[in-house]
Image (cartoon, grey):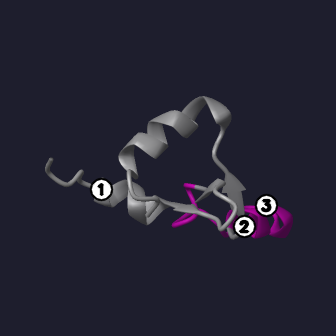
Amino acid sequence: MPKMKTNKTASKRFSITGSGKLIRTRGGKSHLRRNKASRVKGEYDEMHPVSPADESHVRRLLPYGA
């Protein structure tokens, strides 16, 4: 049986913790940050969990746990 291919864009955007949770960064942090509050800008640097509705789709893109 051939190897399964990892989706490379998904492996750069999502990561899996040691306990198996999927985490992601927030989008929209590359520009227009000057007029955002410092509290909001700090939220962009945190890792957030993937929603349960999308988790099965992301796991299919990362067959080896990236």
Q: Position of residue 40 (x, y in %)?
A: 79, 61
Query: Toward which corner of the image does residue 24 lie, by quadrant?
Result: bottom right
The residue tagged 3 is 40
Magenta region: which residues? 27-44
Question: What residue type is disc 2 on?
Answer: Glu
Q: Nearer the viewer, residue 3 or 25?
A: 3
Let me know if residue 42 is in the magenta part. Answer: yes
Instruction: Label the magenta part by its dominant secondary structure.
Output: loop
Q: Secondary structure at mark 1?
A: loop
Q: Secondary structure at mark 3?
A: helix
Query: Toward which corner of the image does residue 48 lie, by quadrant?
Result: bottom right
| Mark 1 vs 3, N-terminal side | 1
Question: What whole-number distance in Å separates the C-alpha atoms at marks 1 and 3?
Answer: 33 Å
The residue tagged 1 is 6
Query: Toward which corner of the image does residue 15 lie, by quadrant?
Result: bottom right
The residue tagged 2 is 46
